[in-house]
Image (cartoon, grey):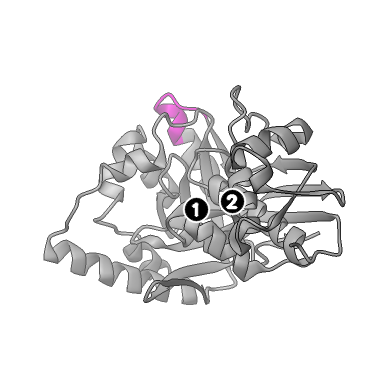
Amino acid sequence: MTSSSTNSAHISVPASSANLGPGFDCLALALNIRLNAKANWDDKKVKLRDFDSPLDWWRRCVLPHCKYTGSVATLEDDEGRPNLVAVAFTKAVLTGGPEYYLPEKLVIEMHSEIPVGQGLGSSAAAVVAGAAMAEVFRTGKLERQAAFATAVEIEGHADNAAAATFGGLQAALLFGRETRASNIKFSEGLRVALAVPKETLKVSTDATRRWLPESLKRTDAVSNQRALLTLLYGLRLGNKEAIRAGFEDRLHVPHRKGMIVGYDDIAKAAMEAGAYGVTISGAGGTMIALGEGDMKPVANAMAEAFSRHGMDATPMTPDIDTQGLTQL
């Protein structure tokens, strides 16, 4: 049963941009665009065996008490199926087995500024938030490593979850069957520009994965390995030439850029405005550019290029987040 000595959790999780060109499924950068969530529960507890299913518990004990605002205002659908916050909370609580207690009444308030479905880690942030609140419920304290482990299990890939949990530039490493997050040093002068389409792409991340090749030619595989090493070198030193060369990818960008109308024009506009490198953020459709100094001209140039191709986009220049998951 839970050993928590508190009846609430208030946490904050950053957005993240995964892949950064050749770092497919293993590299992500945390961005200071945040999801804030607050959960409250009373002392009355129930067990999962008292319900038909975890979904039954969610509908009866949680759904009537949820309030979502910002980009997650429509998180619940009409059928009341649990969202990723609910899935993560339940899974994290039940890591101790079905005899673990669940709250009889769980009140969740959540506000997010992270654009949904735009390659900025909105799903990873929701999963990390749910898992983190569950850890506070279970143990009375924020357990970041436990929240990360739950998020990886649900997400299936650890890049966004690593950045959302630990902040900064994170590499998702695999030690046998264990996934670990490793902090990667980057230049303090590094800055970010985004152009976020106002219309969400009609294609899911899983769908875009099906566009990718099952195998690569040896020359392409070697090229991607070299590009990733070049990128990491460039990010650590803030080296323009290395970042530009390091963003060259042959695994996923060539197959995903077709869904972003005007991709080449947008990338060209970013570089001409002063970016060191530009690529797709996550699975898209956001475009991310890295550089130094004032990145507003770069963000504006990308948004204007989107507009030339009939797509409205919001320019953004968020700070790189170095805190990750925090308890407020």
On the image, the x and y values in percent for residue 1 come to 74, 62
Mark 1 closeness class: few <14, some 14–19, many ≥20 residues within 10 Å: some
Measured in 3D between alpha carbons, the distance from the residue under mark 2 to the one under mark 1, in whole angstroms, is 8 Å
User: How far across and down, in percent of the image, does residue 60 sit?
Assistant: 72, 33
Q: Residue at x 58, y 67 (%)?
A: 168
Tag 2–tag 1 contact (CB < 8 Å):
yes
Does any portion of residue 101 appear in the rendered image? yes
Q: Earlier in the sequence, mark 2 or mark 1?
A: 2
Is residue 72 visible from the viewing direction of this image? no
Residue 135, numbered circle: none
Q: Nearer the viewer, residue 47 or 148?
A: 47
Viewer-proximal residue among 38 and 225: 38
Please identify the quadrant where the C terminus is shown: bottom right
Residue 41 locus on image (x, y percent): 83, 48
Disc marking residue 127:
2
Q: Residue at x 33, y 61 (%)?
A: 22
The amino acid on which the numbered mark 2 sits, given as a three-letter code, is: Val
The residue located at (63%, 35%) in the rendering is 56
What is the tally of numbered marks visible in this picture?
2
In this rendering, position of residue 176 left or right of residue 51:
left
Q: Is residue 108 left or right of residue 81?
A: right
Above or below: residue 289 compared with residue 188: above
Q: Position of residue 134 (x, y in %)?
A: 70, 56
- Is 176 on the left-hand or right-hand side of 183? left
Residue 311 included in the magenta stretch of the image: yes
Is 244 in the magenta?
no
Image mark for residue 154? 1
Name the residue type under label 1. Answer: Ile
In the image, the segment drawn in magenta is 305-312
Q: Is residue 204 above or below residue 254?
A: above
